[in-house]
Amino acid sequence: MSSPSKRREMDVMKLMMSDYVVEPINDGINELNVEFHGPKESLYEGGVWKIRVELPDAYPYKSPSIGFLNRIFHPNVDELSGSVCLDVINQSWSPMFDLLNVFEVFLPQLLLYPNPSDPLNGDAASLMIKDKEQYEKKVKEYCELYAKKGDISGAITDDSEEDVSNDDVSDGRSESSEEDVAGNTDP
């Protein structure tokens, strides 16, 4: 690849030509909304989420920012902001990965194998550990309430954008301090 911008264009085009519904924001390729379906044979099967993707200028050398725009009950996704706690995006990103990896591997893995010991949603983590049956019930309830195909078209209306600011999606940085909220990935 001759430059990060050419790689960005190629990765976005590859994602658009795949089976995903991709909506560029502001007619550019740095910000996208992508329709994501819960993995088969998981608690999230049948759910449909709108995922906000922001590509930094240094992409693919710097990871994309990823966030759920409609609500999901998961230990590693902040329920209000949609921010994702996923090591491969936040800390171990490599230019070898592309946007298709995010949607075909990383997000399905996140939903299939939640990590309650490193939560962004403490309630989901606690419930998963203490009462798996109630946790599973709540996941399915959220899928019914917030993750149906008809719901995602409204996921990015003016009302819901107030809840999800650009600062709330994962930014790919791994900086942390003792004042950070629980949920940052341990080194």
Image (cartoon, rainbow, N blue to C red):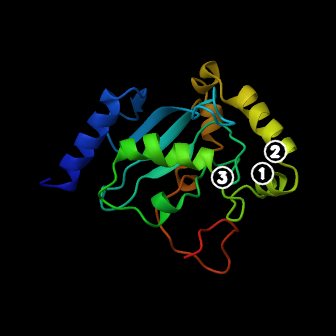
Q: Give amino acid for label 3.
A: Pro
Residue found at x 73% / y 55%: 121
Alpha carbons under labels 3 and 1: distance apart: 10 Å
Q: What is the x, y in percent for residue 111? A: 61, 45
Of badges 3 and 1, nearer the viewer stands 3
Marks 2 and 1 close (CB-CB < 8 Å): yes
Left/right of residue 77 with respect to residue 106 in the rendered view: right
Which residue occupies the extreme bottom position in the image? 178
The residue that label 1 is drawn on is 124
Residue found at x 83% / y 48%: 132
The residue that label 3 is drawn on is 114
Considering depth in this image, is 185 or 176 the residue closer to the camera?
A: 185
For label 3, count other residues whose C-alpha is less than 10 Å away and answer few (under 14), some (14-19) or many (20+): some
Q: What is the x, y in percent for residue 177? A: 61, 79
The residue that label 2 is drawn on is 135
Of the image marks 2 and 3, the number of the one nearer the N terminus:
3
Left/right of residue 2 with respect to residue 128 in the rendered view: left
Quadrant of the image containing the C terminus: bottom right
Of the image marks 3 and 1, the number of the one nearer the N terminus:
3
Q: Secondary structure at mark 2?
A: helix
